[in-house]
Amino acid sequence: MFFRFDTAVPLRWADVDSAGVVNNAVFLSLMEQARYLYFQHLGLLTDHVVPFVLAETTVKFERPGRLGMNLEVAARTRQIGGTSFQMDYEVRAGDEVLVTARAALVFVDGDLRPCPVPPAWRTAIEQFEEMQSGG
């Protein structure tokens, strides 16, 4: 899988259990941070407001993470629909993939109801990911 964006995500002492293994729920937080940085990199976050919510995620744990590993998360938008978009992730320690994941995210209005993907977001994502217009 090819990713145009990746970012370092440091582990904290609180992220691991007594054996030094990364708690599985922590990987979701690492991907959340990478998603935020992905859209910040694209210049789409205004006043740190995220206009979408996570609707669904699937995570496959390939190998355990351990305290002291230098982790990075790769993120990409795979598809954009009318109100939602699909993202893929890899959490890596060097060349080793620890976790792969997919997420469905939905743009919402002030009442948390689905709303159309804003044209500026669609354009920026499609250009960055070199997608054909319309997903």
Image (spheres, rainbow, N blue to C red):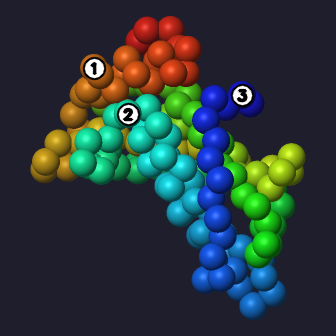
Q: Which residue is mark 3?
A: 2
User: Where is residue 6 shown, x and y percent of the image?
Assistant: 64, 41
Answer with the quarter of the image where residue 28 lies: bottom right
- Residue positioned 43% across, 32% down in the render: 42
| Label 1, residues with CA under 10 Å away: few <14, some 14-19, many ≥20 | few
Q: Looking at the picture, does residue 27 appear above or below residue 48? A: below
Q: Which residue is mark 2?
A: 43
**Left or right for 47, reference 31:** left
Instruction: List the single residue furthest toward the top.
Output: 132
Discs 3/2, front: 2
| Residue 101 appearing in the image | no
User: Where is residue 5 shown, x and y percent of the image?
Assistant: 61, 35
Q: Which residue is mark 1?
A: 119
Q: Are marks 3 and 1 in contact (CB under 8 Å)?
A: no
| Label 3, residues with CA under 10 Å away: few <14, some 14-19, many ≥20 | few
| Label 2, residues with CA under 10 Å away: few <14, some 14-19, many ≥20 | few
